[in-house]
Image (tube, rainbow, N blue to C red):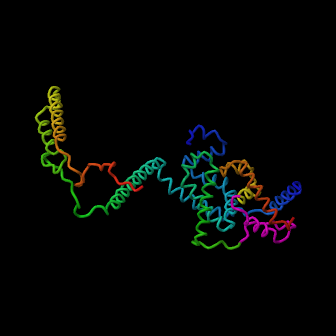
Amino acid sequence: MKRSEDDILDENPADNVLRAALTGNDPAAVKLLWDRYAKGLLAYLQAMLCSLHDAEDVLQTVFVNIVRQRHRLARARNLDAYVYRIARNEAFRLIGRRKKNEIEEPVKESWLIVSESNPEPDDLAERLQRALEHLPQSQREVIVMKIYGQKTFLDIARILELPQNTVASRYRYGIEKLRILLENLL
Amino acid sequence: MTNEKDRQNEQIESLLRKARLSEPSSELKGQITTETRRVWSQTSQEGPWRIPIKRLVASVAAAVSVVWIANISSDNSVARWQTSAPLATRQQPSELEVLPEMPYGPFVKHLTSIRRGLPATNGSGLRRYVETVRKLLDEVQQNDASKPTAPIGGRSRVYPDRSRSISYS
């Protein structure tokens, strides 16, 4: 359902600033977009693709697509959901190409980092990464957004356009599976 | 049991929090923002007013191509029934008099000749026409009644007398 401009403009001020920049064809919108989305999108894409290298490639495509669709984005009901939908579509496109063997499978690289000061086993990042890779993508994306993106269930539900209960149950099931997979670390 | 699970789930959460994800590097930022600005300047030359026009043109093109494809597929699907020369044609008789082998042929001919002579919209003419038709039908019925009935297939319609039948008891 299309909403009137008055409905759209009653949201938070950051949204309105971004919408105004996008509508006014102001190139400063690129910086606003980067500051607002780059970190979260890269984390999300890493969770989707299990590869930093691929996530960086897709991030560039996502930003280019956002700019191309900026007039539509400015009229979108939910800016975050629109941007993450673009990212999700691009990630699925890459996964599809991987399945068709159009591109090589990602080299096993570490996309999780454990800070050196942490007195944890050396292979903790690798174990966590392997366990996360075993989760279904729908559960992994919720866990990554919650733990590493520091988003609430409400935020995630808005971004993924899902009911909050669905998001919470996906998180719970994912954590349960991780508990089984990482039993020896507990 | 549930408490134990909850405690372990919390441990998993804290274990996950010990790790972190890579953040976008400044190099990546430079690369992406440069590319994005380039695309921005390319696309800003075409105003937003062009978007509905583009959509309209695309819709018209899509509609034309759908009609064109439908025509082609329709032609292809009926092609097998279209031979070079038609196999049979239907001939419309120009005169009712030439109708061959029609039941009650003379009656129908007479009827049409009467009908031609009468104006269809005239009330008295219509009444006269109905009367004439009724007379004709009476004549036909009388003729049918006066004709002797021929035995079908040469067999007699006289049923055998049952009283004379031989009993096998």
Residue B82 position (above or below residue A14): below
**Numbered label tally:** 0
Query: Which is more toward the observer, B28 or B87?
Result: B87
Residue B67 placed where, x, y %? 37, 54
| Image x and y of residue A124, in percent | 81, 68
Which residue is located at x 78 percent, y 70 percent? A126
**A34 falls in the magenta region:** no
Give the quarter of the figure containing the C terminus of chain B. bottom left
User: Could you tell me which residue is drawn at 48 percent across and 53 percent down?
Assistant: B45
Residue B88 position by quadrant: bottom left
Q: Quadrant of the N terminus of chain B?
A: bottom right
Q: At 66% across and 71% down in the image, what residue appears?
A: A106
The magenta segment: A109-138
The magenta stretch spans residue A126: yes
For the residue pair A160 and B138, the one nearer the viewer reads as B138
Q: Classify residue B37 as left or right of residue B142.
A: right
- Where does the image place residue B29, in percent across and percent down from the top left? 65, 61
Q: Horizontal placement of A115 versus B27: left or right? A: right
> Is A148 left or right of A57, judged from the image as shown?
right
Vertical arrangement, residue B31 with respect to residue B49, above or below: below
Q: In the figure, residue A146 lies in which quadrant?
A: bottom right
